[in-house]
Amino acid sequence: MWRGVVKSWGKRLPSGWSEAVWSVAGNAQATWRKSCLIGILLLLTLVLFKPHWYLPNRVYDWYFVVDITQSMNVPDYQVAGKSMSRLQMAKQSIRKTLSALPCGSQVALGMFTERNVVNVVEPVEVCSHFAALDQTVASMDWRMAWAADSFISHGVYHALEQAPQLGKQMRVMFFTDGQQAPPANPKYMPSYAGKPGDVQGYLVGMGQRTPSKIPKLDEKNAVAGYWEQEEVQRFGNFGMAETLSVLAMEQGQHDRNAGHGPGNNLLENAHLSALDAQNLQRLATITGLHYVRLDATADSSHWATGLGMTAWRWADTDLRPWLGWAACAAWLGYLWLTFAAGPGLVAWARSVKRRIGGITRPGK
Amino acid sequence: MWHDIAQQGWLATGYGEHWGLAHGWPLLLLPLALLPWRWQGQIHFPHPALQGLPVDPLSVWLERSWKATLSLLIMALSLALSGPYLKSQFVEKVGRGAHVMIVLDRSASMNEPFVKKGDAQARVPKMEVARKVLKTLVAQGHDDLMGMVTFSTSPILAAPLGNDRVFVQAALDATEAGGMGFTAVARGLGMALDYFADQPVTGARAMVLVSDGGAHLDGKTQDMLRAMFMRQQASLYWIYLRSESGVSLKQSLAEGENIDAYPEYALHEYFQTLNVPYRVYEAENPEAVMAAVRDIARLKNKPTRYLEPVSRQDLSQYAYGLAWLAAVLLAVMFGLELKRWQS
């Protein structure tokens, strides 16, 4: 019974094609059409077994460094109506990036306070160690800080020094608000030892441009107060006196015994914290990093997987997309060979041609 | 307004929050699904009288379903190629063996060697010895869950409690940078104990403290730490890296000596009052520590279930499966096709 039905299916589609064309082209075409279909089926059956192989793959190596100084506790982000601290925001954005990195990428973690960056974990593969990486980032906390100073230039340079030791193609993503505390004497600032662009990466600016008060948190992370101007002034230490001339001293100047604070205009706002874009921009120019600002909607995963950050490496590669693309090509072939002989396709091609011709040659 | 509504709808789908696409551009293949419907005609049979035959409804439907299958195949493929995935998923794992938290001292004194004299081989820094020992510990006991806290002035969680050994090794390697600051034993232990706080007690919990000296704990801290140990029922293993000038914990202090002058001795005394199993291993030389490693490897636990986050759950396999089904259907229909006209 089926045979009869199917026969009539074929019957319904008549043709004005000449007998000669069909008999010459027909056989080869039918064979190709059949092999296309078999190809699709074979390729997709292979895909079901999730084939994978070691191939050169596009991966990204990142060294994420988080500033855990107290100014990062300033809650000046607004996400879905809730305020979020800069530190939370940085952590969240690292965790998002972790899940966006392709397998085979290497990730190392570090934390910055005072003058140096502590490398918490050496580079590990991101997919197989995702759980541990994710939890380690989540546990990063200001209470892990071993000192309260925040010398941002020292920190950035230190991170850039560490990066080549962690991996040849290691990029650095440094999350910070750029706050320098206490105010530093420019004479004692370090200079960058490397060439700009030696290490690629991003300097991610956190926080708003308008200054806010820095909360003092207790051991249980509850706000116990805010840093006051007077408290901050105590920490201003600016180094040696600049005048060491006897003559000047004889004339009544006693620099050696005077306090060498940074001066009132620098300390005036030292208890407030805002994104110090200028400082970060300057550091970015010196080191060749890219300065970007992380606002509430920005997505650091786009930066992390952006152009110029790629590292090609042999890695376990999923072969399914390759087979999938081949199947797509076979599908097109099958479709083409099915309709190629038909007058419909020829007519369609003609009408398209006519339309294009009409557009390009309006004069004729 | 329409823009707002569209944005709301987009947000409601949870794109970016709960799921995402690895690449968007393979979706450009989707319009190809229209091709089978736009193109006309089938295989032709050079027979003059076909036009005269009546239309067969079943054939019409067969043709339609054939076209639908073609469309489905390419749609499923383009979806699969764009790589859809679910975000922040959890997988359930079963852990046997003990839960071991390593608490490693990385204070400045750890950079000093065991003995000051002798050749370079004898003067290995204590940090290096500790790292070597811990690496052996981590390499053994494959069922144990392990984590690590390092501390100097403040504790840092270097590796969360889990069965990811390679990660603990990587964290151990990172301690190579060298120590700094002071020895805050209490805070390090406190943080590691905190790690057990959210989990039910299912068996052996061990804290492995690796440090080279004592630190003075005030009465309040002592009580707090004691309470924490009791609550978490964790046993304590102290691998004491004794330097040449350091005091041995095995001998009791001579009569009349002030215990406060020997902080490690005071710490040892205090640990004995914790009411939890406590053992101390003195490591004058690198080999002595293997005993500790063996003891810890002997700890056992009931099997426990726990959830572990995975980076993303790939959904493309389902789309590939759908494409495969469509391909099978196509093959079946190919078999039904009329290849040659017989009249």
Image (tube, coloured by chain):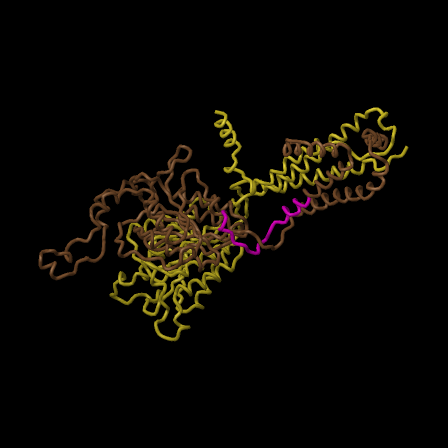
Towards the viewer: A273 or B38: B38
Give the answer, above or below, for where A289 lies relative to B72. below
Left or right of residue B28, residue B147 in this image:
left
User: x and y percent of residue B189 in the render?
Assistant: 38, 53
Instruction: Please give the count of numbered marks on the rendered protein.
Output: 0
Q: Position of residue B57 (x, y in %)?
A: 79, 25
Q: Nearer the viewer, residue A28 or A322?
A: A28
Residue B253 shown left or right of residue A133 in the figure: left
- Judge whether A355 appears above or below A321 on screen: above
Residue B52 seen in the current view: yes
Visual hue assigned to chain A:
brown
Residue visible at 59% across and 53% down? Answer: A316
Q: Which chain is tinted yellow?
A: B
In the image, residue B119 sits, relative to residue B107, either above or below, namely below
A326 is within the stretch colored magenta: yes
Q: If the image is split into quadrants, where does the C terminus of chain A sit?
A: top right
Q: Position of residue A10 (x, y in %)?
A: 82, 32
Furthest toward the right, the residue is: B343
Q: Is residue A278 left or right of residue B51?
A: left
Q: Is residue B182 visible?
A: no
Q: Residue at x 34, y 63 (%)?
A: B109
Q: Which stretch is magenta?
A: A306-327
Q: Quadrant of residue A76?
A: top left
Task: Tell me if residue A329 is in the magenta stretch.
Answer: no
Q: Quadrant of the N terminus of chain A?
A: top right
In the picture as drawn, the residue positioned furthest to the front comes out as A363
Quick one: which residue is furthest to the bottom in this view? B118
Q: Nearer the viewer, residue B169 or A330?
A: A330
Quadrant in the rendering for residue A210: top left
| Residue B9 position in % (x across, y down) | 52, 29
